[in-house]
Image (tube, helix red, strand yellow):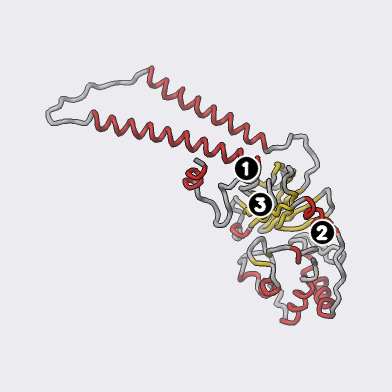
Amino acid sequence: MHTITTALLAIGPPGIPVLHPQSHYAHSIFELSSWVLWVCLGIFLLVAGLVSYAGWKFRARPGDADPRQVFGSRKWEAAYVIGPTLLLAVIFGFTLHVMHTSDPPAQASGDDIVVVGHQWWWEVRYPKLGFVTANEIHIPAGKNVQFGFESMDVIHDFWVPELGRKIDMIPGRHAKIWLAADHPGTYLGACAEFCGKEHAWMRIRVIADTPATFAAWSSAESRAVTPPATTSEQRGLHYVTSMPCASCHTIVGTSARGIIGPNLTHLASRETLAAGRLQNTPQQLSAWLHNPDAFKPGSHMPNLHLTDDQRNDIVQYLETLK
Ligand code: CUA
């Protein structure tokens, strides 16, 4: 049954498994959708079967007189209204129940993680742990994690289908849901509400760690970065803090304190760049700095027309931000 449902509903953005629930929240959504799908399939077969049967059984034959005309039937009309209404009410009840499972109580405070949508990347705050990162979200596996959601500009929609429900991020509002991952692993998601030119490149990576790995990761994120050692790295730091980079990006421990773009404090510990558009390798980082528009046309990351030497120094420096 599970396999058939999966085959019937094999849709979703490429590479993002939509029908592979990996938490009790995602499981309850998956079960509800499968159940509704099978009920609807049953109704379709029943209606299509009855229509086909009637069409065949009562077809006109040569010499037939006009059929007897029927003008309504109270009994059947009532059944047509009451039957579907009851069915929809039952589906509505189950849907409310499933929605309720992943919603923290209205008075719940203290989000573990707050995700802020920006055109076109995700700011990820850990208010309890006291640091900020971007685009890649680490969570401890096997725990219910309370997520808060906000938006800095337009409506975005956070969706990591393996871990739970979708949630709209509406400017001026704070939404919250629980998400979880049963097992350690990497879970992919994407923005699910059209939010402008680079909507398709607002990818999400949730990395569920074992408790020990999560503790190690969060203590590394809280640590100050080590000062650059080589002269090239030092020049890189100088460029980052003296050029426009610093007015958009923060690197904790330096004078770079911008909040328009992603926090770069531990950039080198991330797997991807530009919300999933590029792999975080020195080559791709350099290519991104050389011409952001080649990868994300319309992104707010400007082309600073760096010389090759400047770019090389900046990459050397950014690679130290482990
Ligand atoms: Cu953000 Cu679509």
Q: Quadrant of residue 285?
A: bottom right
**Residue 37 image point, x, y percent:** 49, 38
In the drawing, does residue 247 fall left or right of residue 170?
right
Which is closer to the viewer, label 3 or label 2?
2
Tell me if the residue at label 3 has its CB under 8 Å from ligand 1. Answer: yes
Circle 2 sits on which residue? 221
**Mark 3 burial class by Cα count in 10 Å: few <14, some 14-19, many 20+:** some
Q: Quadrant of residue 253?
A: bottom right
Which sits in the foreground, 182 or 75? 182
Q: At label 2, which amino acid type do we have?
A: Glu
Q: At label 3, which amino acid type do we have?
A: Val
In the drawing, does residue 5 fall left or right of residue 230?
left
Which sits in the foreground, 45 or 242? 45
Please say if the residues under marks 1 and 3 sit with CB atoms less than 8 Å apart.
Answer: no
Disc with the residue nearer the chain's start (3 vs 2) = 3
**Mark 2 burial class by Cα count in 10 Å: few <14, some 14-19, many 20+:** many
Q: Secondary structure at mark 1?
A: helix
Q: Residue at x 86, y 60 (%)?
A: 223
Circle 3 sits on which residue? 154
Q: Residue at x 64, y 49 (%)?
A: 160
Circle 1 sits on which residue? 26
Disc with the residue nearer the chain's start (1 vs 2) = 1
Quarter holding the C terminus is bottom right
**Residue 33 image point, x, y percent:** 54, 39
**Mark 1 burial class by Cα count in 10 Å: few <14, some 14-19, many 20+:** many
